[in-house]
Structure formats: structure tokens, C-alpha cells
Amino acid sequence: MHAIDVLAHNPLIGRAVANGKRELVIGRKGQGYLALYHYVDAIDTVFVLAVRSQREAGYARHAP
């Protein structure tokens, strides 16, 4: 949850995805999580829509 706190100061840090949503990558090498969120500039608010593991999100695990 602490990783999501970065959005309070940098709401556009995540990569853009479809429909104005963004993804914040938390962790590394397929062991982390993705937070899907939407930032509404007019009210300066971030809505976290989902948090899931990178494996669940369909990221392939790469051999070292």
C-alpha cells in the first residue's frame, strides 16, 4: 500500500492504458503488482480501481 502513496504527489507517474486509465508497476521481475487507476485532474483525485499481481495480469516470466 505504501507504493500507491506515490500517486498523491505524482498522479501521472503510471503508464497510460486504455480509456484514460493508468497502471503503476509495483515491484520487479514478475514478482510485483500492478495498480490500475484513474486520475481526475479537475478534482485532483486518484481512484485506484484494482491491484493485482503481474502474473495475474498476463506478464510472462522471463528466464534469468
Image (cartoon, grey):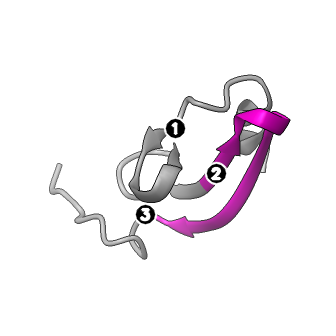
Task: Give, as a three-letter code, the residue at label 3.
Answer: Gln
Question: What numbered label is drawn on residue 30?
Answer: none
Q: Which of labels 2 and 1 is toward the front? A: 2
User: In the rendered view, would you say 53 is above or below 48?
Assistant: below
**Residue 54 marker:** 3
Depth order, front residue of 24/64: 24
Residue 39 picture location, percent across and down: 67, 43
Residue furthest front in the image: 42
For badge 2, the amino acid type reads: His
Residue at the image position 52 percent from the left and 57 percent from the top:
34
- Horizontal side of residue 23 vs 7, given as left or right: left
Residue for point 55% across, 29% down: 13
Residue at which label 2 appears = 38
Using the image, tell me which numbered label, if any, was put on residue 14. 1
Q: Residues within 10 Å of mark 2 (few under 14, many from 20)?
A: many
Residue 14 image point, x, y percent? 51, 38
